[in-house]
Image: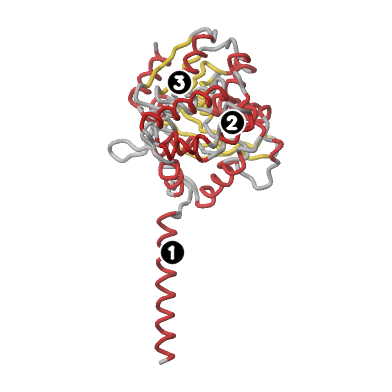
Amino acid sequence: MRKKRGYKMKIAFIVVVVVLFFLIMIILPPSTGKIPQFYDNNGELLANSISEKCYLEVDDVQLGMIILAKDMSNPVLLVCGGGPGIPEYLLENIYPSKLVDEFTVCYLEYRGTGLSYNSDINISDMTTERYVTDILEVTNYLRKRFSQEKIYILGHSFGSFVAIKTIQQYPEYYYAYIAMSQICNQKESEYRAYNYMKKQYELSGNNKMLKKFAEYPIHESDEMCKKYFSSSLRDTAMHDLGVGTTHDMRSVITGIFFPSLKCIAYTWQERINIWRGKSVAASFPVAADCLDFNAFDNIKTLQIPIYFFAGKYDYTCCYSLQKEFYEQIDAPAKQFYIFENAAHSPIYEDSEKAEKFFQEILYS
C-alpha cells in the first residue's frame, strides 16, 4: 500500500514539474537573442540589410543597441526611446512601424536599462549630462560606421527630453529632429491629464475611480503630484480611457509586460534585465530632471529642423502642450504632424500615415 502511495506521489511530482516546465517555456521561451533578419519575397536575405544587436563601450560601460535596416544606404536614424527603462525596440517588435523602410535605425538602450543594464550601476551617475554624452558617443559611432556626415534623431516621450538637450548642445551632427510625444512641461501635462480623466469619470458616473482620484489632490502640492505620478492610478486611468501608451491599449501588463517576456529578440536573461532596469530607472537623476523640465523656458530655438509627431489622444505628454510648444519654438523648418486616432505612440499606432510623413521629411 505504501509503495503504491509513494508511486502515485512520484507521478504527481513529475506531472507538476512537467507542467511548470511548459508554463515557463510559454511565458519565457528560450532564445539565443538573435534579431530577426530581413528577407525578400523569395525567402532570400536582403543583400544590403542589417539586423543586429551590438555594443559600444563608453566610459567602461557597454551601451546596448539594436540596429535595423532593409537598405543600409538609407539615412541613419538614432531612436531615443521612452521610459526610461522600456526599450523602444519592444514597441517596434509588438507594433511594427515603417521606420526600417526609410532609415537605417539604431535603437539605443540607455545606460542602466535594457541591454545596457548592469547590477553594479551607481544610480547617482545616471544624470542628464551622462545620457547626453552617451547619445553623442553613439551618434559619432553611427556617423563613422555608416559614413554619414550627419544623422537624424528621434525622441519619444522621455527620449524627447534627452534628445532635445543633445541637439541643443550639438546641432552640427544632426539633419533634423523628430519629436514624438515631446515632453514640454510635464508637471503641467500631469495637471491637464488629471483634470481631463477626472472629468471623464464624472461624466460616466464612475464613483469608484473618482474616489481613487480624490486620494491624490495633486493641485495641493508638488509632493502629492509626485506621489500621483508614480502611482498605479495614473497608469490605470490613462489606459482605461485610451490616452496612455496607445489609444487601444488597456493595460501595460497585457500590452507590454507579457509580450516582452515572449520577445525572442532578447535572451531570457536580457528580458529579465529589462524589468530590473525599469524598476530602478525612476530613481535616476535624469528621470527627476525630465519631470522638472520646462521646454517653454529652456528651449526657445533650435538650429536644426524639428518635426512633431503627436497623437490627439495623448495625455501622457499632453497633445495640447505639444502644439503650444510647436507654436513657440523657432527653427530653420518645423512641421506639426497630427495622428487623429493615436495616443502616446503614433508611429506604432498608424504606421502607414507615419511612413508618408517620414517620406515628406526626407524627400520634399
75 versus 329 height, above or below = below
Residue 28 % position (x, y): 45, 54
Q: Earlier in the sequence, mark 3 or mark 2?
A: 2
Name the residue tied to disc 2: 225
Q: Secondary structure beneath disc 1? A: helix
Label 1 to label 2: alpha-carbon separation: 44 Å
Q: Earlier in the sequence, mark 1 or mark 3?
A: 1
Q: Residues within 10 Å of mark 3 (few under 14, many from 20)?
A: many
Given the image, on which type of amino acid does mark 3 rest?
Tyr
Given the image, on which type of amino acid does mark 1 rest?
Phe
Quarter of the image for residue 7 reads bottom left
Residue 180 badge: none
Residue 167 placement, left or right of 310: right
Look at the numbered discs 1 and 2 and tell me whether their residues touch, using CB distance below 8 Å.
no
The number of callouts visible is 3
Taking depth in this image into account, of 22 and 158 the one nearest to the observer is: 158
**Can the viewer see residue 70?**
no
Q: Earlier in the sequence, mark 1 or mark 2?
A: 1
Taking depth in this image into account, of 228 and 256 the one nearest to the observer is: 228
Which residue sits at x=71%, y=41%? Answer: 122
Which residue sits at x=33%, y=39%? Answer: 44
Label 3 to label 2: alpha-carbon separation: 20 Å
Residue 319 badge: 3
Determine the residue located farthest toward the bottom in the rendered image: 1
Taking depth in this image into account, of 203 and 247 the one nearest to the observer is: 203
Q: Secondary structure beneath disc 3? A: helix
Q: Residues within 10 Å of mark 2 (few under 14, many from 20)?
A: some
Q: Quarter of the image containing the N terminus? A: bottom left
Name the residue tied to disc 1: 21
Given the image, on which type of amino acid does mark 2 rest?
Cys
